[in-house]
Image: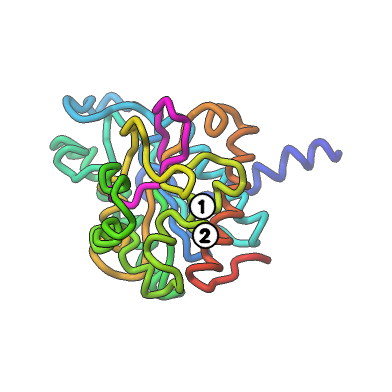
Amino acid sequence: MIKLLLLIIPFILSASLEYTNSNYVKYLQGTLPIIISAPHGGTIQPDNIPNRTYGKKGRDRNTNLLAQDIALEFHKQTGKYPYIIILELARKKLDANREIKEAAQENQEAIKIYNTFHSTIQNSIEEVNQKFKQGLYIDLHGHSHPNNYIEFGYLLSNDILKLPNSEIKKYQDVSSIKNLSNISKESFIEQLKGKNSLSGIMSKKGYKTIPSKNIPYALDDKYFKGAYNTKRYGSYYGGNINGVQIELPRVGFRDTEENRKKFAKDLVKSIIEFMMTHYDINLEK
């Protein structure tokens, strides 16, 4: 009987993930000021949508599953869920982290799915703004760089991260956390790579992260700074939703269910600490 209950409970939790009107966009309505999207983990390849002929097509393996693990971990630690938006369509069919021309390449069905994915994010952001007046947007990805670091992208290139702090701070207005300083008591540099930044908090848990005080930039220049989604939904264009792209190695993070759940637990703890420090919002039960 106990074994049966253990099997049923995860099913009940996962069943709370609702689908939008597109079969390829999975959506969970949240109750926290946190929005998480996973655009590149999908595996479905319908015949009626042709493969894209240009642009990157590689899959960020298991990021769709990791997003759901993070949602469940948030519920364990806070009793509430973040907003989750997952594209289950394969990236070779649609890249939802690009502007629409490159993303859908004029296929009408792909365009519809693209619009559903982005309108779902936008509606979630508007709901967070209405309820909380501020929030955090995370675009979840996977990388295959040899350094095996967690890469936190705020739209600042690796070349910018190599600069002295006195120069880096001049780029605040072109970052995806431009307006975090309106809320946080800490400086832009501290928000970016200080001990209480997301990368700094994860670093204290034993992870190797970029940018951080220990690793301020990638020595081999292998670093993803964030792309279309982070720019569109962070505070680059204004507003009180700040954004970050999180790029994860596969081995040790996304490769097994055990590793996904371990990472999800540490990430959620770190986000809770980050939100308390910079937003003065206590998410704990």
Determine which residue is flagged by label 1. Answer: 200
Q: Residue at x 39, y 72 (%)?
A: 129
Q: Is residue 259 magenta?
A: no
**Residues in magenta?**
141-156
Q: In the image, what residue type sits under mark 1? A: Gly
Q: Is residue 283 above or below residue 85?
A: below
Query: Which percent across, then down, holds residue 71?
Result: 56, 50
Q: Does any portion of residue 79 appear in the rendered image? A: yes
Give me the residue at 40% from left, 37% from top.
88
Q: 278 or 230, which lies in front? A: 278
Specify the farthest residue to the right.
1
Residue under the image location 47 percent in, 36 percent down? 149
Kind of residue at disc 2: Asn
Question: At numbered mark 1, what does the secondary structure look like: helix, strand or loop?
Answer: helix
The picture places residue 181, in percent across and down from the top left corner, at: 37, 70
Question: In terms of depth relative to the viewer, which is nearer, 121 or 181?
Answer: 181
Asked if marks 2 and 1 touch (Cβ < 8 Å), the reply is: yes
Label 2 Cα crowd, 10 Å radius (few <14 / some 14-19 / many 20+): many
Q: Is residue 67 left or right of residue 23?
A: right
Q: Is residue 233 visible?
A: no
Quarter placement of the N terminus: top right
| Relative image position of residue 215 (x, y in whole percent) | 44, 42
Residue in the foreground of this view, choosing between 173 and 15? 173
Q: Name the residue tied to disc 2.
A: 196
Quadrant of the drawing holding the C terminus: bottom right
Residue 142 magenta: yes
Magenta part, dominant SS: loop
